[in-house]
Image (cartoon, grey):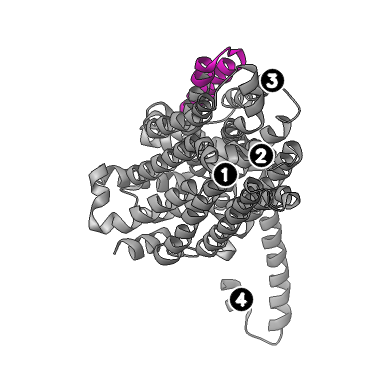
Amino acid sequence: MAIQKDIGNGSGDNDVQEEVREPLMGKNLADEENGSREQNISNWMVYLSTFVSVCGSFEFGCCAGYSSPTQDAITEDLSLSLAEYSVFGSILTFGAMIGAITSGLIADFIGRKGAMRVAAALCVAGWLFIYFAKGALALDIGRLATGYGMGVFSYVVPVFVAEIAPKNLRGALTTLNQLMICSGVSVFYIIGTVITWRTLALCGLVPCAILIFGLFLIPESPRWLAKMGREKQFETALKTLRGKDTDISHEADEIKDYIETLERLPKAKLLDLFQRRYLRSVTIGVGLMVFQQFGGINGVCFYTSNIFESAGFSATIGTITYAIIQVVVTALNTTVIDKAGRKPLLLVSATGLVIACLITGTSFYLKTNDLALKAVPALAVTGILLYIGSFSAGMGAVPWVVMSEIFPINIKGVAGSLATLMNWFGAWTISYTYNFLMSWSSYGTFIIYAAINALGIVFVAKVVPETKGRTLEQIQAAINS
């Protein structure tokens, strides 16, 4: 500005300004390129830390996907009854409930890395119990242990990633959590069709080993270190993540100010959630978790192979197709959630779930009544694949995104714990009752799920707000006013 003002008078103004502007533009472009290159170099530790931590998300998926391809083999080898296998399948989510409840305390007490180590160690112990199992008791102990680890991972991994990522990468990196969960489920679905159930249990050790080793290579969450008052370690961790030559003073001050603000806020208690000003946000968060789980996802997810077999379709082909669709649709979802909006995705997803349940229920009705038997496998496959595609398109990931946006900061911990607990309670209820419902009425089971998903459409349309393109403060002010 000063240069242009000084030389901007006279007959050669334009020529002189061009001469000055060109080197300045060239310098700016060069600086931008160098800055971009330096940013990419300095972010390598963020990427490595994210990769290591989302191995916990992948392990989560492995635990969830284990029961589907192994049901017949485990039941036959260990002579389990339907009730015993239902306990084995569902106790995972019971362990996850306990893990989710205690995860916040563990992560706050021994750090994010410490919590991931505890979760990985319990998963290792659980898989070994399952591998060496000779009866139902050892299976259940192993499944409970892996469930506990899974519950801890469900909390600590997205928290760790969000806390280490720079703001321009946070959205993209946090979506990897859900993608890796789906990938873990899908990988176990696929390889579970070609290896034994004991070997598949050993495969569950692989992501744990990568995680445990990788944690020695990455820093602790700077925000947790700041919260614990470890000033020197906080600055070292932040510099490691941002690059040695990066000026971290501004970000460090922001983090410290935020921690101080948090410390000044009153500690929220469970009963505080039922105050009138918080009631709507709690209703939205808990309600979305209820409809996400009670729509039948864990029944379908845990027993996919059995559903295909019951309908007379190849379990191997059906399970592999299911796994591929789940990963592809979830990956696509991460690219459109900020463009399409949360509410439209939820409505489209829930509508697809209703249609999918009705199609699947129709296939089982036809089979039960010996009607159009040739159409039964095609209808069942169409219904199940539409179900997982619809779920992955919205109801799988979006409730977690909305939950992270709607709670005011002073109740976020307690409200998030309540919503997460409700999520795991629903997962346990559906996974435990699924086999009993199918024994009662195969088509009736999916009619019930269709009805619940239909109620979910009404809930989303009437209660859930659109949060796309709004700051957290705007969202919370609108909901809690």
* Vertical comparison of 262 with 336: above or below: above
First along the sequence among labels 3 and 4: 4
The mark total stands at 4
User: Magenta stretch?
Assistant: 115-141
Q: Earlier in the sequence, mark 2 or mark 3?
A: 3
Q: Disc 3 designates what residue? A: 199
Q: Circle 3 — which element?
A: helix
Q: Position of residue 295 (x, y in %)?
A: 50, 49
Residue where numbered disc 4 is placed: 4
Q: Is residue 268 above or below residue 212?
A: below
> Label 1 is placed on what type of residue?
Ser
Along the line of sight, the residue nearer the viewer: 289 or 197? 197
| Tag 2 and tag 1, C-beta contact below 8 Å | yes
Q: Are marks 2 and 3 in contact (CB under 8 Å)?
A: no
The N terminus - image quarter: bottom right
What main secondary structure does the magenta stretch of the protein show?
A: helix
Going from N to C along the chain, the mark reached first, 3 or 1, is 3
Q: Amino acid at mark 3?
A: Thr
Instruction: Report the disc number at residue 310.
Output: 2
Instruction: Give me the C-alpha separation between circle 3 and circle 4.
Output: 73 Å
Q: CA distance from mark 2 to mark 4?
A: 80 Å
* Mark 4 element type: helix
Q: Amino acid at mark 4?
A: Gln
Q: Is residue 281 visible?
A: yes
Q: Does the stretch in magenta take in 390?
A: no
Q: Nearer the viewer, residue 316 or 471?
A: 316
* Kind of element beneath mark 1: helix
| Tag 1 residue | 442
| Label 2 environment density (alpha carbons within 10 Å; few <14, some 14–19, many ≥20) | some
* Marks 3, 4: nearer the viewer: 3
Task: Point out the tag, 4 or 1, that comes first from the N-terminus.
Answer: 4
The residue positioned 64% from the left and 21% from the top of the image is 76
